[in-house]
Amino acid sequence: MNRFDYVRPNTIAEAVAAAAEPGAAYLAGGTNLLDLMKGAIAHPTRLVDVSRLPGLDGIARLADGSWRIGALVRNADLAHDPAFAKTFPAIAEALLSGASGQLRNAATVGGNLMQRTRCSYFYDTASACNKRVPGSGCDARDGDNRLHAILGWSDGCIATHASDFCVPLTAFDAVAEIEGKTGRREVAVDALHPLPGTTPERDSVLAPGELITAVRLPPAASVFARHARYLKVRERTSYAFALVSAAAGLVIEGGTIKEARLALGGVAAKPWRARSAEEMLAGVRLEQAAFARAAQAALADAKPSGDNAFKIALAERVLVRALTLAAAGTPVRVPALPASPFSSPAGVALHA
Amino acid sequence: MTLSISLTINGERRDIALDDPRVTLLDLLRERLDLAGTKKGCDRGQCGACTILVDGRRINSCLALAVSHDGAAITTIEGIAQGDRLHAVQAAFIAHDALQCGFCTPGQIMSAIGLMSESQAGDDPERIREAMSGNLCRCGAYAGITEAVLEAQAQLAAPKTERAA
């Protein structure tokens, strides 16, 4: 780990000023940043410790029915907040399917949004990686790339975004509140992570020194509570990043889907909202054939970026199953194995 | 630059001068405070050997800068027995043969204590396995570990009179 200056500001304004210096990075839970620093992938010259900034650790339902989650709320505290989890069960399930108990106690909401890819070539400083060293090339293209992107990738980068939390946030139109030198602005979580194009080193649309202070869910996001699930297929039962995941939310009235929300994880450099599939589902009879058509539409533009064509078929099946689970109804309690395909409520067919 | 922090470690307040902000809680405990019970496995948050309680919550001490935790209350494996009387989780690990080489054991035990205070797993072995997935055991003592956590959980849930008997 390189040497750095450590500063601990007392206010958001002080933090933003301290982080405007070139080479500065914010430190909150540290679970991703310190890992990256130990691997010499990140080498900030100044750490701005925001972990004690006041007023950023609340979970509140606002007067208009929207919810605001402070950026310093720990993943475990959000997932276990009873009122929040009841209103947004797919978000709670996604959080509990990520990382480990220890990491969820440390990792923050803001840090989850700002985490970097887990592409193994990004982590290996002996490999070429355009995200780590712009212009150096991408060793993943001809490497071990069965886990890599199938949507929105470019010749320069085929990495995926690793967050579970961001997948239902994107599906349910969450917005990030951001403070910077020029004041406050808001960015939809769906628009926070740009696709790689020719600038894969750019992970987010945040300007240097900008700080996420909260995530907000609009009032309309809470109508899916009775039919909302997160499903995550991984290469071991627990404590693994997604191979493919999906968040699904439905509003069902009299056997008809009134509204649908769908997003995929593990398939692109950002959480992937499936709007065309949502539109196909709105107003149709609740039946498996509709789920299958929607899933095909969601993956219509998918292309393998290497040895990962299987992820396209897998993503379709994950979408169908996530919709099937959502239609069956949100379980009273998050399953023992959150979001796991090995965990299903009694009486629900696992396979479409 | 010297950074001064104070920590309450296993109930004892310690004032510590740090000459370098890079020191993690793990390295502070092991290398500077002679509390080597907390183990360094991967040093990257993947194995759980370094699990400690910070303000009662289990975290990976390898991914926590000491300077960022000024004022915290830390509990390590050295701080859970009362004299010669083992903590219920320690006793259950012995009773259920929940270890072989023992390297991961301090982290397993601290993680189990943390998970019991989180009150999410109850007596469901599946939930216990899931909640312990951040602690790897290369010897593969997982079956015994799950049994040990189940027993410790049952003991803590039982009325005190039964426990004393």
Image (spheres, rainbow, N blue to C red):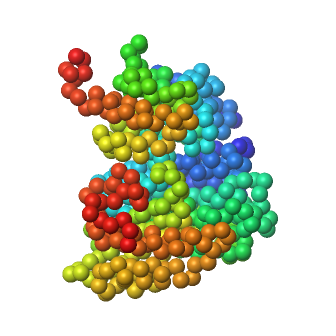
In the rendered image, the residue lying farthest to the top is B84
Across and down, in percent, residue B95 comes to 39, 22
> Residue B78 at what x, y percent from top left?
49, 22
**Residue A153: x and y, percent?**
64, 74
Q: Which residue sits at x=28%, y=69%? A: A328
Residue at image position (52%, 27%) is B100
Q: Is residue A46 visible?
A: no
* Quadrant of the frame with the N terminus of chain A: top right
What residue is at 32 percent from the left and 30 percent from the top?
B151
In the figure, is residue A197 to the left or right of A106? right
Image position of A36 with respect to B57: above or below = below
Is residue A100 visible in this depiction of the protein? yes
Q: From what the image shows, is residue A261 above or below residue A68?
A: below
In the picture, the quarter occupied by the C terminus of chain A is: bottom left
Q: Position of residue B146 (x, y in %)?
A: 40, 36
Is residue A305 shown left or right of residue B45? right
Residue beneath the point at 68% across and 45% down: A38
Give the total of numbered labels: 0
Q: Is residue B164 left or right of residue A192?
A: left
For residue A130, which quarter of the picture? bottom right
Name the foreground residue: A141 vs A115.
A141
